[in-house]
Amino acid sequence: MDDARLPLNTIRSMSLATTVVPTQTDAASRPQVTILMPTFNEQRAIRAVLAEVVAAMSDEPYSCEILIVDDGSTDATPDLAEQFAAECWRFPVRVIRRTENRGAGFARKIGVREARGEIVVMLDADGTYPAKEIPRLLAHFPQYDQVNGARTSEQGTLPWLRGPAKWLIRQLACYLTGCKIPDLNTGLKAFRRDVMVPWLWVVPDGFSCVTTMTLAFLTNGYAVKYVPIDYRKRIGVSKFHPLKDTAAYLSTVFRIVLYVRPLKVFMPLAALVILLGMAKSVWSFTATGSMQESDIVVFTAGFLTCMFGMLAEVVVAHHRR
């Protein structure tokens, strides 16, 4: 039996002495792993990152392909990627060129759909994530459905703003999902393609796409693991917009939880409104000796919010069936 066709858990149990470096023909027929790299104006980093990926995976016992999805770059990024693809002999390298810039999430969705591997590893092309960590992530399959690289430091622009904002959004996500999340929006993650494809419809086109991918697995009960990794300063200019993208991350957390666990949002809100109604009623009795119409309005709003949450939960449960 050809080693390139063995399942991941069988390959992993083989002796290191029998490690097989797959040929292009074997990997193209049925790669086990797709390294997906979305790019947009990364000409300063693309070749170095691709070379780092090849070096990291060359001695690993997985059949592998590299897939670059260029999201309408205006520099030489896609040309350099295609040049590397023509020169690379260890793994098949495919380049998908988009003529229009639609966002990192849009490029990732195309890549997941076009990936041939059963496991997809997403890696940013700006040099921030060390490709040498990819084998560490793959070592946890098939026990886990998604493995994320949890960054141990913040090297992005405006760390004084990004740090507190990420912490706040991450704490909210931990509460809403009931899971501990060390890094909510890491750009280095590996996951089962068959699990992710049905949830691509909720993935936005912008930066919050990786947050959605993490929450889609967590809120649906899939096994998710975090592996601590180093994080480096990016090569080139950051495309992160502090206010717009932070707002997008926050809305993404609420949106994906509403899709899957709506009571986590509606019930605390309903309880808060009902408590406000009780407090207002006590104040009204103290001041006027009777309840006011506004007190009834607040109570009604609280109970309606609760009913909306229960109705949403029924709809979600019916959709799951």
Image (spheres, rainbow, N blue to C red):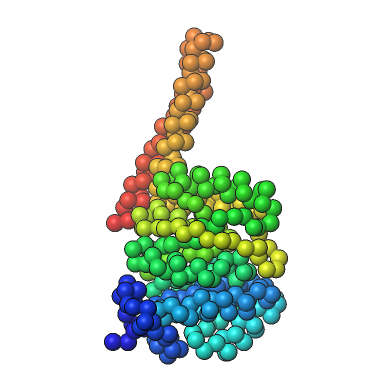
Residue 288 vertical position relative to residue 56 in the rendered view, above or below: above
**3 displayed left or right of 85:** left
Q: Quadrant of the N terminus?
A: bottom left
Q: Position of residue 98 (x, y in %)?
A: 60, 77
Residue at 37% of width from left, 67% of height from top?
Answer: 141
Which of the 4 image quarters holds residue 266? top left
Label total for image: 0
Quadrant of the drawing holding the C terminus: bottom left
Whether residue 122 is situated above or below residue 66 in the rendered picture: above
Q: Residue at x 44, y 48 (%)?
A: 180
Residue 179 higher or lower than 298, as above or below: below
Seen in the picture, residue 37 relative to 144 is either above or below; the reply is below
Instruction: Decide if residue 208 is in sight here.
Output: yes
* Residue nearest the observer in this picture, 244 or 135: 135
- Quarter where residue 176 is shown: top left
Front-lying residue, 265 or 142:
142
Please, which residue is most extreme toward the front here? 17
> Which residue is drawn at the image coordinates 42% and 86% (left, top)?
22
- Does residue 204 appear anywhere in the picture? no
